[in-house]
Image (tube, helix red, strand yellow):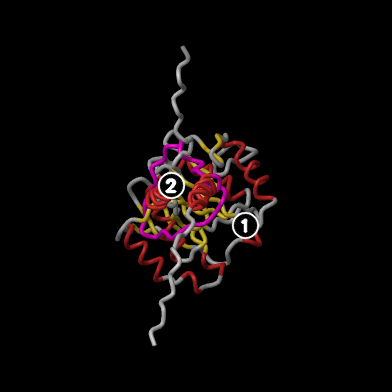
Amino acid sequence: MKLARKKRKACLVPMTSFGDIAFLLIIFFMVASVFMKEAHIKVQQADSPDVDKAKGQISVVMDTEGDVWLEGHSCPIEALESAMGAMLDDRSDKIVLVKIDRDLKQEEFGKILAALAEAGADIVMLGEREVE
Amino acid sequence: MRLARPVRPPGDVDVTSFSDLAFLLIVFFVLTTTFLRPEGAAISIPSSTHDPERKPKQDPTMINLSADTLLLNGKNITMDALRSQLFDMKLDQVEDDQKTIILDSASDVTFQRYFRIVTSVSRAGGILAIQEPVEDAEEGNET
């Protein structure tokens, strides 16, 4: 006996909402992206073979001119210790990422390190990895 | 004379390619995005103290750094030799008291040179103590 073949239904996937989903994804990434706080600061990083991946939220930068930037905002070096102390007070981790221009002299960057150490910061010095 | 109005075409905009366009944008951003992964070295610098109780019992290791010389406990040494000597000291296995390494840096030392020393000490497991000139309050002299 020959069985009659069932007629297949037309396989149409509704794709109308794909565009909405895609645009929602774009909007999500645009809103959730955090742009670099220090993109406007000019710094040439030092290098060393002894660097690892670093984690931290608060950043202090000393640029090529010797100006100090705390979280992307200009901060006089005299005010750094008190500003940092206030920032670290309500934080559980005291990690501070420090980026200093490679050509600056110790008489300039030494003050930053002293101020951060006095404020109780756990200093992480940022630099590039030099291939051994 | 009355003119016949032209028949308007139906006003549906074809949005089929919108999703293709949007996904192409997503793929573009995903492929071109580079995440910022900072690299560095955690430096353990104790805050300054005048408490004689907290001074180390034995003489700590001393590094003297200037623009063109590097001394380890008073002896001339190269950057690479210092690095290997610090590793040989196995600072991560000794007591905190013996981990302290005093870094006395001249004012003309660049951060590049300083960074190499500091990261070597950090990698070896040492605690860095920075020696700073202190002004005598009574006499106004640097000591």
**Residue at the image point whose x is 38% and y is 56% from the top:** B71
- Predominant SS of the magenta segment: loop
Crowding at mark 2 (Cα within 10 Å: few <14, some 14-19, many 20+): few
Q: Position of residue B103 (x, y in %)?
A: 47, 54
Q: Is residue B131 visible?
A: no
Camera-nearest residue between B13 and B64: B13
Q: Is residue A51 magenta?
A: yes
- Which SS class for mark 2? helix
- Which SS class for mark 1? loop
Q: For residue A53, which quarter of the picture? A: bottom left
Q: Which residues are magenta?
A: A31-58
Q: Position of residue B23 (x, y in %)?
A: 42, 50
Q: What's under tag 2, amino acid-wise?
A: Thr
Query: Residue B16 — which label?
Result: 2
Residue indicated by mark 1: A93
Question: Where's the N terminus of chain A, which quadrant?
Answer: bottom left
Q: Are marks 1 and 2 in contact (CB under 8 Å)?
A: no
Q: Residue furthest bottom?
A: A1
Q: Residue furthest right?
A: A90
Question: Where's the C terminus of chain A, which quadrant?
Answer: bottom left
Q: Are marks 1 and 2 on the same chain?
A: no
State which chain disc 2 sits on. Answer: B
Q: Position of residue B3 (x, y in %)?
A: 45, 17
**Residue at the image point whose x is 66% and y is 57% from the top:** A92
**Looking at the image, is A43 positioned above or below residue B125?**
above
> Gap between marks 1 and 2, in whole Å?
50 Å
Camera-nearest residue between B107 and B16: B16
Crowding at mark 1 (Cα within 10 Å: few <14, some 14-19, many 20+): few
State which chain disc 1 sits on. Answer: A
Count every numbered label the image shows and give the total. Answer: 2
Q: What's under tag 1, amino acid-wise?
A: Asp
Q: Position of residue A86 (x, y in %)?
A: 68, 45
